[in-house]
Image (cartoon, grey):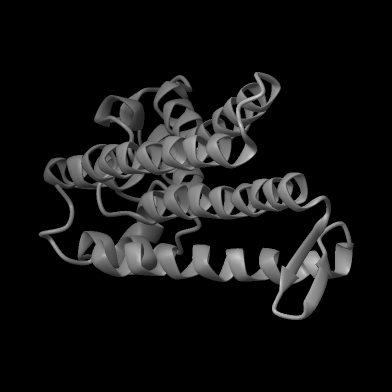
Amino acid sequence: MNENTFSKKLISLRKKYNFTQQDLADKLGISNKTISRWETSESYPDIDLLPKIADIFHVSIDYLLKEHDDFKELDKFDIISYIPWIISLVGVLTYYIFTKLSIPSLFSFIIYYFIIKFSYIFLKKYTDRKNGKTLVNLNTIANFFVSQALISQILLIIVFMSLTNNMAVVGNLNIDLASTPQLIGPFVFSYIIAGIYAFIHYKSHKTDEYCL
């Protein structure tokens, strides 16, 4: 093992995942002083700890030990982190295409919603099985919910505007959906819901039964 290579990569990975030396030490069941010695090349981990370190950072053991930089595995995860946004974009494009084809707006929105919903189910299973119980998993799911909630609200507004000619009637109160201040509430609410889902997902990942 090249100690300098390992120490540099360990520091880089730890910072990338926003772990302190104590955070990493707790995950490995060792002291933070041991992590410090690894990062200063004073010592290096036992062979049986390498698989666990690789699993925590979603890289291969070879990546940790190679002298040259190879970011293929990191890039792979970085690409995965963009999947929620790609799915949301596909949903928006689908809605736009259906609207242009003169399909009723409400029907188009329903189709968009189910595309996003089933895409989320697939994404959740993928992250659970491939990435394990990590904060990276939480970030991916949280990003998805934020994008879904935000875009859902935008499209819902578009639907109401197309069906009610820019006006929605709630009881005896007329609400102008084209008025920017009145759109703040739905956006704030959507982020709150997204945060709740992300929190539930994080809590449920603490149980061994949840992660397949």
**Which residue is situated farthest in the bottom direction here?**
172
Q: Is residue 45 left or right of residue 82?
A: left
Q: Position of residue 55 (x, y in %)?
A: 25, 42
Q: Position of residue 207 (x, y in %)?
A: 16, 66
Residue found 67% across the figure and 27% down from its top: 99
Is 189 situated above or below 68? below
Q: Is residue 134 visible?
A: yes
**Which residue is situated farthest in the front direction here?**
172
Residue found 15% across the figure and 40% down from its top: 47
Residue found 35% across the figure and 38% down from its top: 118
Picture quarter with the N terminus? top left
Q: Position of residue 119 (x, y in %)?
A: 39, 36
Closer-to-camera residue (192/210): 192
Q: Position of residue 88 (x, y in %)?
A: 56, 37
Is 129 situated above or below 103? below
Residue found 57% across the figure and 55% down from its top: 149
Closer-to-camera residue (45/14): 14
Q: Is residue 174 left or right of residue 90?
A: right
Q: Is residue 33 visible?
A: no
